[in-house]
Image (cartoon, grey):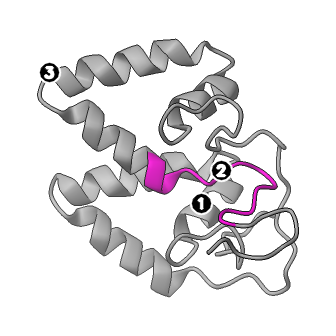
Amino acid sequence: MKKLHRPHEDRKIAGVCAGLGEYFELDPVFFRLFFLFSILFGGLGAVAYVVLWILVPLREGAQSGPGNGKRLRLSARDRMIGGVCGGLGEFLELDPVLFRAAFLVLAVIGGLGILLYVALWLLIPGPAGAARGRRAGGRAQG
């Protein structure tokens, strides 16, 4: 029987969305977006998140649950600004230009494209295996 746990890794705040993603075998970004929009439109998302934070236990041990290997991540290869459109294109196997055009249209029509892009930039994990702000020698850039 599957159990809902909050993992130690792949967490942004408390691991609630990462745990939901593992349990339902979906990418945690979908749950992060759901909570973000529910906070923005009514505030119940914050209450639900805190309740889950309290009720869902931390997973014992450091191993993560079964993964399907394909996760939504920022693109390291096809990035114009933050890698959001490239990452969406790689995940959905579509041309990133389609996402760039959609964000541009949404930005022109009321600014929603900018808000959505920034939210995705903050919520989607970085490229797999990339150490941000580090050189090949392992030292932080100064």
Helix, strand or loop at disc 3?
loop
Q: Is residue 132 magenta?
A: yes
Amino acid under label 3? Answer: Ile
User: Alpha-carbon distance for marks 2 and 1?
Assistant: 6 Å
**Relative to the observer, which residue lies in front, 25 or 2?**
25
Per the rendering, the mark at residue 20 is: 1
**To which residue does mark 2 refer?**
24
Helix, strand or loop at disc 1?
helix
**Relative to the observer, which residue lies in front, 39 or 107?**
107
Amino acid under label 2? Answer: Phe
Please tell me whether residue 49 is drawn above or below residue 26 in the rendered image: below
Q: Residue furthest front?
A: 142
Name the residue: 77% across, 63% down.
2
Dot placed on the residue nearer the N-terminal end, 3 or 1: 1
User: In the figure, is residue 32 to the left or right of 39?
Assistant: right
Name the residue: 66% across, 69% down.
4
Q: Quadrant of the N terminus?
A: bottom right
Name the residue: 48% across, 12% down.
98
How far from the left and from the top, in percent, is residue 129?
81, 55
User: In the figure, is residue 89 to the left or right of 45?
Assistant: right
User: Alpha-carbon distance for marks 2 and 3?
Assistant: 34 Å
Bounds of the magenta span? 121-133
Q: Dots 2 and 1: beta carbons under 8 Å?
A: yes
